[in-house]
Image (spheres, rainbow, N blue to C red):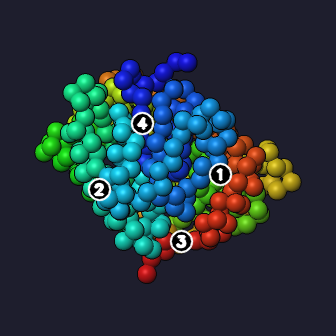
Amino acid sequence: MPSLLPEGINRVLVTGGAGFIGGAMVRRLLAHTTATMFNLDKCGYASDLTGIERLGPEAVQRHQLLRVDLTDADATAAAVRQADPDLVMHLAAESHVDRSIDGPGTFIESNVIGTYNLLQAVRAHWEALPAERQQCFRLHHISTDEVFGSLGATGRFSETTPYDPRSPYSASKAASDHLVSAWHHTYGLPVVLTNCSNNYGPWQFPEKLIPVVILKAVAGEPIPLYGDGANVRDWLYVDDHVDALLLAATQGQLGRSYCVGGHGELSNKQVVEAICALLDQRRPAGAPHARLITPVKDRPGHDRRYAIDPTRISTELGWQPRHNFEEGLAATVDWYLSNLDWCDQVRERAGYAGERIGVGA
Ligand code: NAD
């Protein structure tokens, strides 16, 4: 079986592996390597393991869920000791901006304190490793382009863009990035960081833009479009992001950060209209789905535009996205149409029926 991991990387600890991007990473590594996967996740409202369970018995046997909340320092340290990892990929975080507006405390606890607890546990683990394993060991911290703030009509974020977070979510992620860098500079912990743009694809909990629009349209319900719909995001297909993460984790320069974007800049209105057009083809009885688009009050502090210049990861590590937005979106729409039952189940379990959140006080 071809391996995506260098020799000596046999035990991988992924935090947040019951979530959307972490789950894609765990599935990729289970399917394409022989590594043992430790999945540290508190199993919160957005978590689900169905995609991993569908891989089959051999892969499932190499997957171990460590149901731990990173805010619990002792449990985190015990989980790291149990996993005894060669590589740690840290994706666990509260991830939805709208929820951070309604309840910022959880974001500070999970994303800032949780990252601090993980860093301390990983540092103790790394310091105790025998020299050969210590040499190969890495912690990869996964973050967002939102730490850079909001762009005007021109320009793109790169690794040298100053941090300027604007939401409780992005501020908590910025804090976690700084902690990871500090643990590298102060304690020598071998770290790599990545900051990526908006991901989309299968298995995303249906509270983020693309799955929300698909489900609202299929149900014939109003499709909410925040503000004037002109906010721009740089859409990145989740499997392309996983490619980038594996390159950064295994070949990235220690202490360095890499920006990952999909060359997929589109306004929210363009994204919503593209989904409606795909649904018109796949479900003509409901056409034109665009009639359901309904402007709603904007998100407080809504960043206007994000765009990523991925030159560093492209030139240094040879990464390129394999999917353009049209292909990725068509695959995503088809996946959701084939998995409407899963959407119902996870929304019901989370107690979330697709209602508007994050409008602020
Ligand atoms: P997600 O919300 O789908 O999954 C996050 C997972 O982390 C969940 O399973 C949750 O239970 C777990 N988690 C949260 N707090 C935890 C804690 N205290 N202890 C243990 N587990 C905890 O998020 P995602 O979209 O998969 O994002 C993964 C990472 O990528 C996050 O760090 C996020 O900031 C970053 N990111 C995401 C996007 C995106 O578009 N989705 C873009 C840029 C960066």
Label 4 beta carbon less than 8 Å to ligand 1? no
Residue 340: which quarter of the image? bottom right
- Sequence order check: which comes first, mark 2 or mark 3? 2
Where residue 342 appears, x then y in whole percent?
A: 70, 54
Tag 3 secondary structure: loop
Instruction: Provide the residue designation for mark 3.
Output: 357
Q: CA distance from mark 2 to mark 4?
A: 18 Å
Tag 1 secondary structure: helix
- Sequence order check: which comes first, mark 1 or mark 2? 2
Question: Of residues 119 and 299, which is closer to you in this image?
Answer: 119
Q: CA distance from mark 3 to mark 4?
A: 35 Å
Instruction: Provide the residue designation for mark 1.
Output: 273
Question: Of residues 6 and 214, which is closer to you in this image?
Answer: 6
Amino acid marked by disc 3: Ile
* Dot 1 crowding, Cα within 10 Å, few <14, some 14–19, many 20+: some
Q: Indicate whether 238 appears above or below 99.
A: above
- Sequence order check: which comes first, mark 1 or mark 3? 1
Where residue 79 appears, x then y in whole percent?
A: 39, 50
- Sequence order check: which comes first, mark 2 or mark 4? 4
Q: CA distance from mark 1 to mark 3?
A: 22 Å
Residue 12 numbered tag: 4
Amino acid marked by disc 1: Glu
Residue 117 numbered tag: 2
- Sequence order check: which comes first, mark 3 or mark 4? 4
